Image (spheres, helix red, strand yellow):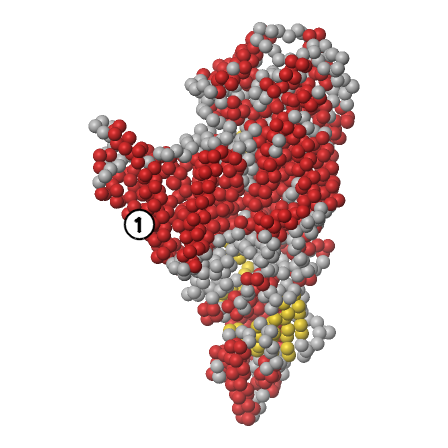
Amino acid sequence: MNDARHGSFDELPPSTVSCVIFFGSIIFTTVAMATKAWILGDTRALREAIQATLTIDQAKPSVVPLQQSFQSIYVMLHHFSLLGILIFIVYICERHPPFSSTERQNFDEDSFAFLIIVACIAAFLSIRKNDKWMLKKYGPGRFSDNGLMEDDEKSMFSSDPSTASNRSGEKIDMQQQKSNRLGSSGSSIKSDELVSLLENDSPLGPGEQNDDGVDLPGDSFEEADAILEDITVGDNIAKALEAKELLEHHVIGVPIISPNPDDDVLNIHQSLELRGLMTCCFLFYQSTNAGAAHELYQNERINGGDEGKILNEFYNLSKICSTAFLFLSGFGHAMYFHRLGDYTMRRLITILFRMNMGATFLCLALDKPYIFYKPCAVHTYFFLLIYSTMRWRRNKNYTKFGLRFKMILLAISIYLSWDCDFGVWTVHSLLFGRSLQSISGAPYGQLWEFYFQGHMHHWAALTGMIFAANQPITSLTLRRLEKLGNPTELLFKGIIAIAITMALILWISGPFRTSKYIFNATNAYFGVLPMLWYVFMRNLTKQMRSYHSDILKRVGKHSLEIYLLQHHVFLTDESERKLVLVPGYPACNLIVVISLLLLSSMILKTATSVLICMLTRKSNDSVAVWRSVAVVGSLMVLHAISVTLSYMEISNPESVATATIVCGILFYQAAMDMTSSYFRSMASSKRGTKSQPQGWSGMEHPVVRGSPPVIGAFTILCFCALWHAASMNSSYNSSMPLPSICGNVINEGKWVNIDSCKDFQKGINAREYHSRSYGECTENQQWGWTKSNHPECRFKFHKPAEVQRKLPNENVIFIGDTVTRSLYFAFCRSLGVENLGYFDSEMPVHSELKTEFGNTIIRFQWAPLTSDVLHKMKSVTEDTDLVIAGSGALDKLHLWATDEDRNSYELTIKQLAKDLKLLKENSAPVVWFTPTTINTPALQSQEKRTQMSEKNIQEIRDMYYEFEINDAATFVLDGPTFTKDQVEKSYDGIHYPQHVYDVGAQILINALDWLVQVPPSSSTSFINPSFQPRPGSMANPILGLMVLCCILIGLLFFDGYLGFSYLASVFMQPMSVPAPNRIALFYTSKEEQSRYSFLPQDVYSDVCAAYGRPRRRKGRQLSQGVQEQFPPSKNGKMNGDEESSQDNSEGATGGNILSSGMSMTSRRSMNTFGLATINEDSQ
């Protein structure tokens, strides 16, 4: 990654330059067009852009597809500009924050619990009933509370059978004329809109899928791709008849009310609520740094600080949330594709844009790899699998087993590629390459990162598809139970609840409580179980399905945007530090940053949703493809320009600004040429009328023609100035290496007092150590660097993993006395070697030591006197990468008795200075460690107190300075800087507690940024030195086979809960009655109802048998008994099945009476997953 981010434009990476030119030229064009419209007195385009922004989340957004008109082009450019300004703000927060970012605090369980409780209270207080969808869509006065038109509600529920029959006849007659009405105008209703109106009971309705990339904005786009025309007043009667048909069924002897889309199983409100809940938990996880919370696995100390062998329940929960998101993605996509049959390229492009538009522009602007936003890559991959499965031989999707067999083939392919190490998975290297080079977000390379992230959830999307395939059966089963009464309902639901809860408890006590490595490898096989448990418990009763938390739903609508932006607006430096906008006030800063994050997410969602709608909505495949190619092609051309500028070494502020303005002028002129006819027609129509806007007659005036480009260029220059000012006055990004100028101020700091009796620490003591009483509170001290005049110097305490990345394959030597040895111990501890340097009477005192960590070797060579250091320096080999040397304290004791000793010592120092300079120039950088502060009263003998007093040691330091030891060294680690305030803690006058030397090690580690140059090819992290990343290594064929068997049960036995429903159904077995007869027998007493099966496969048969009933035509009445009119024939079919079989294809468009009680609340939806074509399969 380019290191020259400290300047405003200097040597920016080509991707950032291309993004600057792209959005800069669009902002130029937008400002110029707005200026021209304002000068001409026509502000319609401005009003339409603002209206589109404000109404995109409403039931009827005022967003129209892209047209070749001034208003339409301006609206599109306006939202592109809005997106560009947002990315500019994100760039400033990430690269040039106004204040230095802070370290993430240690995890506080109390703060995490507090935030969860506050979120639960807010969610509870915002509970709303799911009864506003139709009202918001069609306005007040046309629907009553139960969703019916007020004018038709009375007749719909009339108790007069003849009335109902007549209404049904009218309905059938109207539906037979549907195809004629589709092409008409005026009082017409599109079939897809009717699907959206009455069928949208999935949690991710048409156009609004899940957060990982598919949800179009808010409630208004729940039907975004289904609505083709606005419903008109003349359609009231048609809608009323549809509602009548869907709201009253007689499948099991008593009317089963087919649920409103708002209270069905896993409805859209519920899905958004779940996404919002998981998003809030994720923010709390990040804000409290819960990823750092852990307890050592089996109470063992892990050598080397290998976090992968540590149990962290919060980390495990975060991965469960990721699995749930992918489950919802599979569920939503499967429901959408099957219900609407929309497999067009337009839909494919819409989803891909929705998932990746924001992430792509962020990657370009911030020079991040695509894999940095991991969920986008994973969800895109599994969406393409779902799309391919549903599109391939899509005519089979509407048979009993057609789609299920395709899902089985998909499951087998997933099993072979992800769960069997046959080498099949390596085909993905075509997308991500085979490099193991460490990059942002992928310490072991893109290929391994994608494999690792995908393997953790590779069964989740397919499980969501299976639940979608069985959702109608699950929905009908629940509503049957709710009509039978409490004993039967409680028995059935209770058995399933107990069974699935016991499975969840076993999972919690087993796979969940495992170390990070083990959990990552097994989460794919068990992670969907908590999701199934939640779905069952959340939909346990109709009342629970009919309500949702509004605040969580609103958060859930923006879950994708919140995830993307929290990397830069909430956290920075690849989620290692926290953004600071209110320095010194952490709580206030948290509120401000969270507010900025939510606001930015809303803006990003609005801008991308409007753009996607304008580019793809109401367009055919060819138009959508060409528009997509135009956007991508523009970015590629601009990227080529930026690469050319970089190659010519002219990627400076002047050239970038010039290129932006030139491209802006070209874009503006192209927009004017495209809309010239519009201006001419407007001028002609307005000429001579009183309504003519002021200025239309002066369109050729020089001011009208010249002012827009000038103001556009001025706007670009203002952005350049703002960027330059931000870069010059920022605290810079702490992820970038420190420049060598920081060596002048790195030793400037002090120890500050920290209150150890704050509630934070008291809570930890009470929870972890059960301590309730305290002695007198004392203040501990913590080291901190003082603020300097060099904002680019962002010193910080480094974690072991960060230190490891600074020293890959390095050979480091420490040379010196016992003080230098203590620094060596502290340096090794900073790398993750715990307990090193603690009191150990068996450790050799005056000996050489060696510590290896991965390919890094750290040595200590004993040299108590300066002359010994000089001798050891001559033995330094060329393969040494860094030398740290120090002595002086013992020289005063042993080499200062006579003048001859002093003169000899001076010669030694001069020679040492020459050798240090020669070593620095020819071999390796040298760090000189000056003697630490001496605690004279604590020295253990009179001789030491006389010879080694602080005053005498200061003479040694002065000699180092006088004879240019400090100048000869690459860097000087000043011992008195971090020890003078701790001098009273020196127990023997020379040595200090371990935490003091840890500070010296941290100063040295910060200096490594300019001391050690790490080549990019060697920058891979060795957090786990023994780990060799290889795609396929996480495969587990046994567990994969277990999941495959569960999937086969769910598909072949029609159970969305993968077999759990059968545990309860076995207690409610019916008599052996053929399905057609069972339908007729349902018209008996309520006591007979409990005799019939609730097995999912039997429920499926009952539903499909209902489809086999003959169609009631206008003027034709059925006899009172179904069996009397249509007795079973010899082949087991009811008489009239031949007619109904012929009408099955017609049923896909609404030809048959739909009286199944299914949650598929439209004619098209009643075909869902093969229900309407079972008779075809049986023939």
Give the residue at mark 1. 714
Residue 245 rendering spot, x and y as whole percentages: 58, 17
Residue 886 rendering spot, x and y as whole percentages: 57, 78
Q: In the drawing, does residue 372 fall left or right of residue 460?
A: left
Residue at image point 59% right, 33% down? 391
Is 1000 or 628 nearer to us in this picture?
628
Within 10 Å of the Cα at label 1, are there few (<14), some (14-19), or many (20+) other Cα atoms? some
Corner quadrant of residue 509: top right
Report whether residue 54 is seen.
no
Residue at image point 24% right, 37% down? 699
Is 101 or 722 nearer to us in this picture?
722
Residue 63 position (above or below residue 424): above
Where is the C terminus found, in terms of image quarters? top right
Residue 1165 position (above or below residue 115): above
The amino acid beneath tag 1 is Phe
Corner quadrant of residue 396: top right
Residue 193 rendering spot, x and y as whole percentages: 50, 25
Q: Secondary structure at mark 1?
A: helix
Is 672 or 565 nearer to us in this picture?
672
Residue 357 rendering spot, x and y as whole percentages: 49, 43
Residue at image point 63% right, 61% down? 1022
Numbered disc total: 1
